Image (spheres, rainbow, N blue to C red):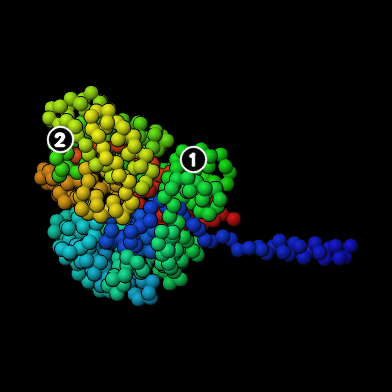
Amino acid sequence: MFNRLRLTAAALALCATPAFAAQDTITIGMVLEPPNLDPTAGAAAAIDEVTYANIFEGLTRFGPDGSIQPDLAKSWDVSEDGKVWTFHLQDGVTFHDGTPMTAEDVKFSLDRARAKDSANAQKALFAGIDSVDVVDPLTVKVTLKQPNGNFAFNMAWGDAVIVSPKSIDHEATDPIGTGPFKFVDWVKGDRVDIARYPGYWGAPAKLSKATFKFISDPTAAFAAMMAGDVDAFPNFPAPETLEQFKADPRFKVIVGSTEGETILAMNNRNPPLDNVKVREAIAHAINRADIINGAMFGYGTPIGTHFAPHNPDYVDLTGLSKYDPALSKKLLAEAGVTNLKLRLALPPPTYARRGGEIIAAELKKVGIDTEVTNVEWAQWLKQVFKDHDFDLTIVSHTEPMDIGIYARPDYYFGYDNPDFQKLIAKLDVTSDPAERSALLKEAQTIIAKDYVNAYLFQLAKTGVANAKIEGLWKNAPTQANDLTKVYWQD
């Protein structure tokens, strides 16, 4: 009896002490591999998906609900005329190489982003800055050319993160930021590894390590989740399998909204796409329901302009480009276009590859042939985005409230409307909420009536995760896999 009691006591002691520490590492699945890891010098959403809030931080940041929150700036003051923004910085912030982050680094980052030779993909965010001045090590003053009530929003973008002049030459391959995770390794074609930064100025991350695993094939993504090789896939590429995950208690399916306007972009520079009737004909040839059901298995909200339906200023303009093949043929005849053949470049995401097949078939029904080319992401960025060598392409614009891109004639789809540019310039200096709302609605209507692009659907955020993981974003107010509050339940 004594021996039995002693053994029982020993067993209870063992039970009181966990045999294993709680899991604190995670593997995140991603469809696309980033072309580089410097969010201030690249347009690919995958860059922010790895680095935003994890490695790099800005003066402000987007919260999971889309709100603008303090980040490296703990607070800010705005002058009565709305032109001078004074940011008060967090104390004790260091870059991952141990050097202090000060107002000098903020000045360097903003001046670099707005320079004439800037490679920043969202240079327009900084165009309104007149000067950046260091008041003291923890205070920086930004003077704008005109008032901009949206400046704190602009500073929350991944393109506006704060970088160090000491590490800028190798940010693309060895990023050094101020975030709760530091860069560890990048195995090209496979993964990026990050680890908790012990010198972080804020609340430390609960995860000690994280790996971003690149899996573009939907079948392989499904297999990786099922095998436990990937713990979470926040933007899962195989929506047709979500019902299987819903039925399996090992997993949770997380469905939310994104800022991703998914469009059939048209190169407005190229004849005959420079003719609005031809662009309208293409828009009426496409059945949005076919694409949402056929490519996304019902996940997605139809849109008729470049604006998120969950935004209170959204205008439903889908009726302007309703599915009407007969009208498409009529418009093409009026434009004098026959035997039209267009090049359709499709990047890797499921919505593009599957949606492209459906769109090509529907265009053929109205007399438009397409030469379909599947391109990898790096090739898309160079050929389509940078060199403008395309006719049609399908892409989801996941940047937050980015209708201002239509005011940039040099942007990849080449829309050049001086009236629209004036409207956006007016919006930039308008602070009154009612006036801003009216201008945003007018902007949406202009591009819809100009049929700049064919607007397909708002990308849903369909994610799959191990049921024990908490803290992942449900919605995507920006393109990010923010791991700052992610943890495993016991």
Give the mark nearer the N terminus: 1 vs 2. Answer: 1
Q: Horizontal placement of 434 versus 238: left or right? A: left
Q: Horizontal placement of 140 versus 217: left or right? A: left
Q: CA distance from mark 1 to mark 2?
A: 39 Å
Pick the front one: 373 or 482? 373
The quadrant where residue 313 appears: top left
Which residue is outermost to the top?
326
Location of residue 32 in the rendering, given as x and y in whole percent from the top left corner: 38, 53
Which residue is outermost to the right?
1
Q: Amino acid at mark 2?
A: Val
Pick the front one: 457 or 106? 457
Q: Horizontal placement of 56 versus 130: left or right? A: right
Above or below: residue 463 compared with residue 129:
above
Q: Is residue 313 visible?
A: no
- The residue located at (31%, 72%) in the rendering is 167
Mark 1 Cα within 10 Å, few/some/many (few <14, many 20+)? many
- The residue located at (32%, 39%) in the rendering is 356
- The residue located at (41%, 64%) in the rendering is 186
Q: Is residue 291 visible?
A: yes
The residue pinned by badge 2 equals: 276
Mark 2 Cα within 10 Å, few/some/many (few <14, many 20+)? some
Mark 1 lies on a secondary structure that is helix
- The residue located at (22%, 39%) in the rendering is 342
Location of residue 108 in the rendering, given as x and y in whole percent from the top left corner: 24, 69
Quadrant where the N terminus sits is bottom right
Quadrant where the C terminus sits is bottom right
**Tag on residue 242?**
1
Q: Amino acid at mark 1?
A: Leu
